[in-house]
Image (spheres, rainbow, N blue to C red):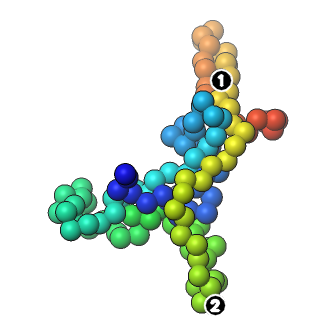
Amino acid sequence: MTNKHFCQGPECHTYPTSDRFLKSKGIIRGRYAYAEIATSNNEDKRWHRYDYRSDTYFCSQTCKLQWLNENMQNIERGIPIPFITHRRISEGYQKVTETYDGWNGGTYKSNSIQKIGVDTV
Ligand SMILES: [Zn+2]
């Protein structure tokens, strides 16, 4: 049982970063939020005394700002915003290793996670 919420960022599960990538299934998964859910037990132990409470809902400032951009109109209109309680995924990703020739005759490898079937330029 985890002590963190899933990140509420609307696009969190679509960013192809290595920490979100699950190679065996070829999927990108949304992150957990940055900070632990506050309880009476861990309030003192949390590593940053002045943690923002919002960090228990988002993995990053980017996700936090995207959530605000997407949802403030709904808040203004009194429309409830669904709370994300399951780990969202995006399917169809693969790890791609590209090899480059260096200026000194050596070769370099670069890994990236890319959507399958999408040509990269
Ligand atoms: Zn996020």
Residue at (26% x, 66% y) in the render: 39
Q: Position of residue 25 (x, y in %)?
A: 63, 34
- 3 relative position to 31: left or right: left
Residue at (62% x, 13% y) in the render: 107
Above or below, 48 relative to 22:
below
- On the question of residue 112 being in view, the answer is no
Kind of residue indicated by mark 1 = Thr
**Where does label 1 land, which residue?**
97
In the orientation shown, which residue stands out farthest toward the top? 105
The quarter holding residue 121 reads top right
The quarter holding residue 17 reads top right
Callout 1 secondary element: strand
- On the question of residue 39 being in view, the answer is yes
Kind of residue indicated by mark 2 = Arg
In the orientation shown, which residue stands out farthest toward the bottom? 77
Q: Which mark is residue 77?
A: 2
* Viewer-nearest residue: 1 or 107: 1
Residue at (53% x, 70% y) in the render: 83
* Viewer-nearest residue: 53 or 111: 53
What whole-number distance in Å separates the C-alpha atoms at marks 1 and 2? Answer: 47 Å
Task: Determine whether the beta carbon of the residue marked 2 sits less than 8 angstroms from the nearest atom of ligand 1.
Answer: no
Q: Are marks 1 and 2 in contact (CB under 8 Å)?
A: no
